[in-house]
Image (cartoon, coloured by chain):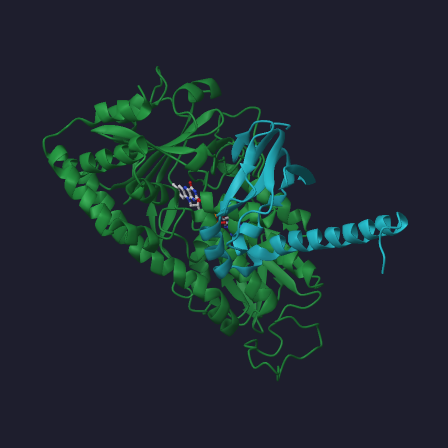
Amino acid sequence: MDGTAVLGRIYADGETVARQGDVGDCMYVVQDGEVEIVAEHDGHETVLRSAGRNEILGEMAIFEHRPRSATIRARGTARILTLDKRNFLRRINEDPSLAFRMIETMSHRVRDLSAEVVELEERLRAAGALVR
Amino acid sequence: MIARRGESNAGASDGTSVAADDAVLVDGSRIAVLGGGPAGSFFAYFLLDMAARVDVRLELDIYEPRTFAQPGPTGCNMCGGIVSETLVQNLAADGVFLSGEVIQRGIDSYMLHTDVGSVRISTPHAEARIGAVHRGGGPRDVTEPRWESFDGHLLARALGVGANLIGSRVEEVGLVDGRPSIRVHGQEPRRYDLAVVATGVNTSLLKALEGLGIGYRRPSLTKTLIREYHVGAEAIRTSLGTSMHVFLLNIPRLEFAALIPKGDYVTMCLLGEEIDNALGDAFATSKEVRAVMPPGWEPEARSCQCIPHINVRGVEKPYADRVVFIGDSGVTRLYKDGIGAAYRTAKAAARTALFEGVSEAAFGRYFMPVCRSIRGDNRIGEVAFRLTRLAQRLRILRRAILAITIEEQVRGRRPRLSSILWDMFSGSAPYGDIFTRMVHPALLWRGLLAMPGALVGRTASTLHERSTGG
Ligand SMILES: Cc1cc2nc3c(=O)[nH]c(=O)nc-3n(C[C@H](O)[C@H](O)[C@H](O)COP(=O)(O)OP(=O)(O)OC[C@H]3O[C@@H](n4cnc5c(N)ncnc54)[C@H](O)[C@@H]3O)c2cc1C
């Protein structure tokens, strides 16, 4: 954290910002520092990715009323701003362009995930584990 | 709707086009933005950003005579400097990051002060959701600016996406063959496809625009008062802290009074009917203000003072063919979140101009609904402020308000009144929404229960001590 942000709230290293399984009513924008997105499954944790300044997180909660699919945790000290779901949806209703960046973020993620699927498939094929 | 130059949009098959023949923005269209305050810069930034997404190259000039980095009134667009919770969140969603180089202090709570005690209202999770800024280079006596001007920051963003800055005051606006022509001192007029008026209300140009024959009538205004006091960051930390301090005092003509902590300065902001110096002095020397300011502070030792106008009733028709009025020169929110309203009207105008056209019909259909929504909400706001005025006059009401808020903040009861006060002070919710919650039966019932205590004059100062843990 370089200490140049003053908005949002400070989270200590390892502190949970949002927990997998909770039903979220907000999303987050990182103001300073870094967070990691971690999926827990059968007692194992997989770090899906990390996110830094100005990145949007937890945006699925804005559109779905379902439990969060991953945990967001501070990696080092981080400063995070919360965006409330209800107010945000009301504002998108007046100004649909507010959603441009979120859609952009989601589309980047789909692109990254597609690339990952291809890479994993190739690795499995190379290991001879994929039978068509 | 967007069309390339030479392309006709006549006979659009979807039947939704309202643009007159060529009243659309195309590659090379020229746009003049009059004023580089928040409204002008937001318009330029979002228009050029959206145009880039749809591959339209526009030429956009911002006319702004101020140098925002300059300390004192010449570099400043005079305001309390609160960037509201809603605007902070909207800009974060838009990807516009506001760093601590611009935001001098993150505000995480409000302190409500009355003659019968005080109470703190905090944000959920004690999060700093509001920003305190200086609009220009800071008060007159700043020698080495430590923070960037908010308006300068937004203007730089607009220039960063391709806007041109013309550092002159617009002296004349004309219409030649239905297209705007703009003249600055000592130069030939320039022709444009669209003129966006974002001059705010503290300018004589608006009077001249009434003579343009487009049906524009200036907004109704009233005078306000702002004073800046240098007290130093350390003294602010130990006195005002990260709270905005709002006062409900029985001073005639005063609708809203606040002390806003910045980096090294405290801004005193008074809104109401024709606020003057005498009223400013009455407020500054009140015991409630002295109790909040650091020990040894002198009300006379101010760094800066200004008496700007504020728009209290928006324009009926803030648009015409190829001309649109955004921010304070058009429609804004009553007393609160003017920068947020500038953002809303600027974006609505930018969306309309790019996607629907620049004709009067297009602005009427796509831009006006946002202005209408703000204007309609202001009417409810007027009623809500009348209720606040009642509380200013009636001590029993102030006691009840304080008692209920303290109950909510300390005992963790559902924050019905706290959320109303928060939204009212911070401008975070529409007035209509606030008003509905004000007349909620559960709150009225709580009010009724608080009345006996308020009647016997149970002192709120003891309640305050409980609330702050003192
Ligand atoms: C006392 C007071 C306190 C306030 N506090 C707050 C607050 O805490 N938070 C908040 O959100 N809002 C607040 N407001 C409201 C806020 O200041 C305005 O809503 C906001 O500044 C509107 O932005 P704007 O861009 O429309 O106009 P302005 O900020 O007034 O900017 C207009 C720009 O146009 C330029 N200009 C003027 N004439 C010409 C010309 N002829 N040619 C070229 N350029 C020109 C000016 O130099 C200026 O830069 C307050 C207002 C007052 C009066």
Q: Which chain did the renderer colour cyan?
A: A
Along the viewing direction, whichever of B208 and B11 lies nearer the viewer: B11
- Residue B164 left/right relative to B375: right
Residue B189, percent across and down? 61, 61
- Residue B294 left/right relative to B107: left
Residue B149, percent across and down? 55, 36
Residue A50, percent across and down? 68, 38
Could you tell me which residue is drawn at 21 percent across and 39 percent down? B392
Q: Is residue A89 visible?
A: yes
Q: Which chain did the renderer colour green?
A: B
Could you tell me which residue is drawn at 29 percent across and 56 percent down? B380
- Residue B469 left/right relative to A27: left
Number of callouts in the render? Answer: 0
Instruction: Pick the quarter of the image with the C terminus of chain B.
Output: top left
Could you tell me which residue is drawn at 56 percent across and 45 percent down? B92
Instruction: Pick the quarter of the image with the N terminus of chain B.
Output: bottom right
Along the viewing direction, whichever of B39 and B382 lies nearer the viewer: B382
Residue B196 higher or lower than B302, as above or below: below
- Residue B125 left/right relative to A47: left
Q: Is residue B66 visible?
A: no
Residue B379 higher or lower than B257, as above or below: below
